[in-house]
Amino acid sequence: DNAFTSQDYTAYFESVASARLEDVMKMEADRMTALSFPPDEVLSERKVVMEERRERTENDPRAYFGEQMKAALFINHPYGNPVIGWLQELDSLERDNVKRFYETHYAPNNAILIVSGDVTMKQLKPLAEMIFGAIPKRDVPERKWTDVPPLTASAHVLLRHPSIRQPMVSRIHRAPSYVMNREESLALQVLESILDGGAATRLYKTLVVEQKMASNVSLSYQADALSWGTITASMTPSDDVSPEDLEFAYDGVLRALIKDGVTDAELREAKNRMKDEAVFARDSVMGPAMIFGQALTTGETIDDVEFWPDNIEKVTAQQVLDAARKYLNPDDAGTMPPVTGYLLPPEPVEVME
């Protein structure tokens, strides 16, 4: 069993034999009722979390760099705060903070139970009603995030660190999540696959194979979010290629796409690739549970998940082009400019003769 927290939800999950399902469900129900908070345990766990932050963020320049990028992108928005928290805030976290959060949010009407594996609804429903139905529901606050104000200036993050040997160029754009704009999100998902769905797709073929400007390139679009999603590009410059030149080449790929659109072959290949990946993602016990959990906790429905392949199939080349022009145009970012970052080695030290 384990747990993790994202910007929008906390997930607890267990993999057990089906004969132990009732025991595990009772354990999860107990997590919602009268949990005790011994002061000494809160303090010890606080130290654990602080050490985790030091290990995973403070001592990892890539993680620290990504955190700074998000903070610059999401001004006046909760997504600008790291999930684990800032170190100085963790240091002041007290038992009452934890207890108040628990009493506010840990209620059965603020949770989703997902069971995947060797069980039927006929077996599961009576257990859920008996175990979770006995817990009184409570009023919980509405999950409504503040918004990022309109921006006009583009931000640039530069971090140099002695442990970095290979430079990295990154660009993050804000873009609508699925629940914010279903049609645009589907188009952005197809666009992601067209730009970075393998060695034969736009970014890798142009920047790595043809122009040899980068040794590695990736682009991902996050659609599952209660508020804004993100489009994140990460690139490693080839030897003797400056970050500035690689950034210009990346923008050139976007300009070409915005000018000429996508081909019918690119669109067909992207859709086939996406639907294949969706099938493979369900080829496990954990996979489907995670897919439904991420979707349902960020405002999507079961139908959104079940009919996702059909909805992807309906996306047109014009919709993909419109999404690219609106959210990835390097020459017109509107009021949502991206954040560009360079993660670099230390500057060379000049030796005085």
Image (cartoon, grey):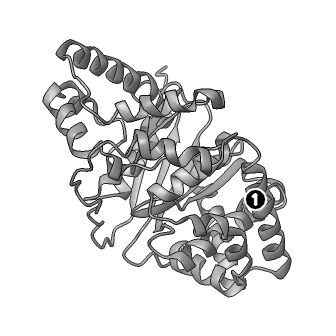
Outermost residue to the left? 96
Q: Name the one closer to the observer, 133 or 333.
A: 133
Splitting the image into 4 quarters, where does residue 67 fall? top left
State the image coordinates of residue 341 (x, y, percent, origin top left): 48, 50
Q: Name the one closer to the observer, 343 or 270.
A: 270
Query: Would residue 32 be visible to someone looking at this image?
Result: yes
State the image coordinates of residue 16 (x, y, percent, origin top left): 62, 27
Query: Would residue 347 be visible to someone looking at this image?
Result: no
Q: Name the one closer to the observer, 183 or 153.
A: 183
**Residue under circle 1?**
197
Outermost residue to the bottom? 318
Q: Is residue 144 left or right of residue 4?
A: left
Q: 302 above or below 160?
A: below
The residue positioned 72% from the left and 59% from the top of the image is 196
The residue positioned 72% from the left and 53% from the top of the image is 213
Q: Is residue 87 left or right of residue 250?
A: left
Q: How many marks?
A: 1
User: Regarding mark 1 in the picture, which secondary structure is present there?
Assistant: loop
Splitting the image into 4 quarters, where does residue 100 fall? top left
The residue positioned 67% from the left and 71% from the top of the image is 307
State the image coordinates of residue 280 (x, y, percent, origin top left): 78, 50
- Under mark 1, the amino acid is Gly
State the image coordinates of residue 300 (x, y, percent, origin top left): 50, 65
Number of residues whose C-alpha sits closer than 10 Å to that of mark 1, classed few (under 14), some (14–19) or many (20 or more): many
Q: 20 above or below 122?
A: above
